[in-house]
Image (spheres, helix red, strand yellow):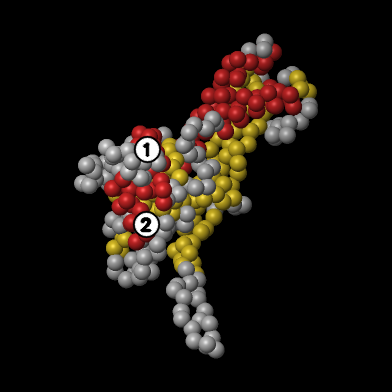
Amino acid sequence: MAYNSSGNPLTSELGDYALTRTALDSFFYPTFNGDMAPGLVTENDPRFFKQERIDQGAFTEAAFIPSGAWSSREELENVRKGTPGMTDPKTFIPTEFSQELDFGLHFFRDQKFGFVKRSLEGMARKGRKTRRVNAFNVYNNMFTTELSVDGIPVISDTRTVADGSNVDNKGTYEFSLPAFEDAVIALEDQRDRSGGEAEGFVARHLLVSNDVFRLATQLLESTTRADQDNPNVLNFYADRYDITIGKSPFLAKGSWFLLADDHTVMRYVREDIETWMRGPEHNSNRVVTYGGAYRETVGVLDYTGIYGSTGQGGAHPDVA
């Protein structure tokens, strides 16, 4: 018999199940939920992963088509109706990630809880890392295998939209103010798949690899320009833009991503982390089993509101 997170106050060779289960959870959950460092982004951050809970084994989402530009209207003329729609469905299938550990009954009877505690903390840390690596690999793969609903990599310099124009949301330069300014302008000028006029996406969130975080913070959050010999030059972006900055150790070195609030980097959660325990009377080798599992998936619907750079193309030519 497996015992759920509420714990059942039953006795066996192990003693009180509820107390034992509570003790094991107290070793696991603090580590799995993790400590937060300054600027560290997790898969739970809605700035970089739009959060959705789903109630089925496969979830199909489609790209949204806005209703188009508004029309002018004369007095007494009927208001023209827009026609929003959905197109190019994409199916997301949540994956279960899980692990169990077995502990000999004597570890508990002999009160060797130090080993049990370290083992569960290690299990939790690896589970936390697995969840974060899978989440941030979506950003790493935007240049290659993570496709927008149009079948093209989310970040690309070869995308052609309906009116024949090119939409380029791919950079290669190392992070700098000139490279960042290019990204801001690219978002503002970005067109959706219908083409036509720019959508005017506003840069709001910057996600960077660990090695870029210090420079990005200095350049964008300092009151004065950190890259100037004259310390009295006002930092335009700190003064005029409200850019939030986050980092992850699981992004490719040098990479950085600029997002509008309208981006569609999605995290679909089917089942949150849950744990269970089986006592020795339910295992033929008389071990205590503790396990955990969660089900989720992360992906991108559309390229709009997203700009990214690999950071591997050297310095921007305008960098002094």
Q: Give whichever of 38, 106 is nearer the camera.
A: 38
Residue located beneath label 2 in the image = 187
Other-residue count near label 2 (Cα within 10 Å), few / some / many at <14 / 14–19 / ≥20: many
The residue positioned 54% from the left and 53% from the top of the image is 58
The residue positioned 57% from the left and 33% from the top of the image is 33
The spot of residue 113 in percent (x, y) is 63, 15
Q: Give whichever of 190, 144 is nearer the camera.
A: 190
* CB-based contact (under 8 Å), mark 2 and mark 1: no
Three-letter residue code for mark 2:
Leu
The quarter of the image holding the N terminus is top right
Q: Where 281 sits versus 54, above or below? A: above
Three-letter residue code for mark 1:
Gln
SS at circle 2: helix
Q: Where 31 sits versus 178, above or below? A: above
Residue lying at the far front in this picture: please name it.
Answer: 232
Q: Where 245 sits versus 108, above or below? A: below
The spot of residue 36 in percent (x, y) is 52, 32
> Cα distance, mark 2 to mark 1?
22 Å
SS at circle 1: helix
